[in-house]
Image (cartoon, grey):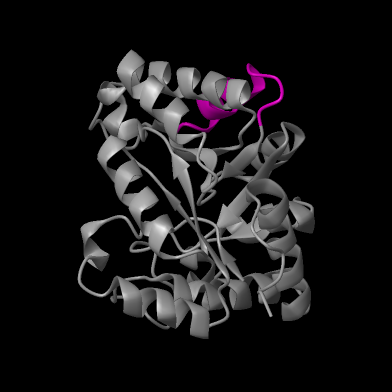
Amino acid sequence: MIDSHCHLNVDDYREDLDEVVARARDAGVHGILVPGIGLDSCERALEIAERYPMVRVAVGIHPHEALAWNAAAERRLRAWAERDEVVAIGEIGLDFYRDWCPFDAQRSAYAAQLRLARDLDLPVIIHDRQAHEEVLAGVEAVPGSRGVMHCFSGGPAEAERAVAAGFHLSFTGTLTYGKGKADRVLKRVPPERLLLETDSPYMTPVPHRGERNEPAFVAHVADALSEKLERDRHDVLVSTSRAAAELFGFPPEPAP
């Protein structure tokens, strides 16, 4: 299994990161993608990748941190992107649910980082909260964009539009909370465009709700996805791991 979105670079894991990674391995996780949300968290993600070969990194400016976007930030992202462990630009996007950062600043940082990813020939990891139309218009305005709509929250129409634009969709522990919009979305998305993620330490799946989330719990997301797709769990693990391998360069299978 591959956890395609996990914030091991936040303080929640400062005290027991070795144990968290070990539990992930024991659960069958052979790859973890850690996205940055700002320059400091990008640096922390790179430090973690140096310690754990199973970790890959995305570098980017989250919409909540969009005021930090400037020419100097772009230079740092470009420099980091030369490192082998950096496989994407992210987490970038738009968040209109909260007004923690001016929307115009978000739009500017988002558009600039989409162009940066195109220039570097890297996929993007997109955060989209109550901004579906502008997020999709943004990727459609940059031909050749590819990546993943992380923690996808749109409906079937937005899902089809994202797939047509060349994107994958990833889902979190919310799949374990019962039936919802995702059930309709999954019927309209090719299985090879689906990824697993935890979004740890957030979005904790059943049966661990109320606890800190961690990458080992991606197994529960896989179980829920298998059930909703009515597909064999092994097939789901193979297809999602293959998708993460093609998009982010993870091994499609665990090392012997």
Q: Identify which residue, 78 or 229, lies in the foreground.
A: 78
Predominant secondary structure in magenta? helix
On the rendered image, what quadrant is the N terminus found in? bottom right
On the rendered image, what quadrant is the C terminus found in? bottom right
User: Is residue 140 rendered magenta in the image?
Assistant: yes
On the image, the x and y values in percent for residue 13 come to 26, 67
Q: Identify which residue, 31 or 99, lies in the foreground.
A: 31
User: Is residue 36 rendered magenta in the image?
Assistant: no
The stretch in magenta equals 131-145
Look at 47% across and 71% down and name the residue there.
177
On the image, the x and y values in percent for residue 220 come to 53, 77
Give the quadrant of residue 73. top left
On the image, the x and y values in percent for residue 82 come to 52, 34
Give the quadrant of residue 167. top right
Q: Is residue 223 depicted above or below 184 in this figure?
A: below
Look at 26% across and 22% down and name the residue there.
67
Look at 60% across and 20% down and name the residue there.
119
Position of 186 compared to 129: left or right? right
Q: Is residue 61 depicted above or below 28 in this figure?
A: above
Look at 54% across and 67% down and name the residue there.
175
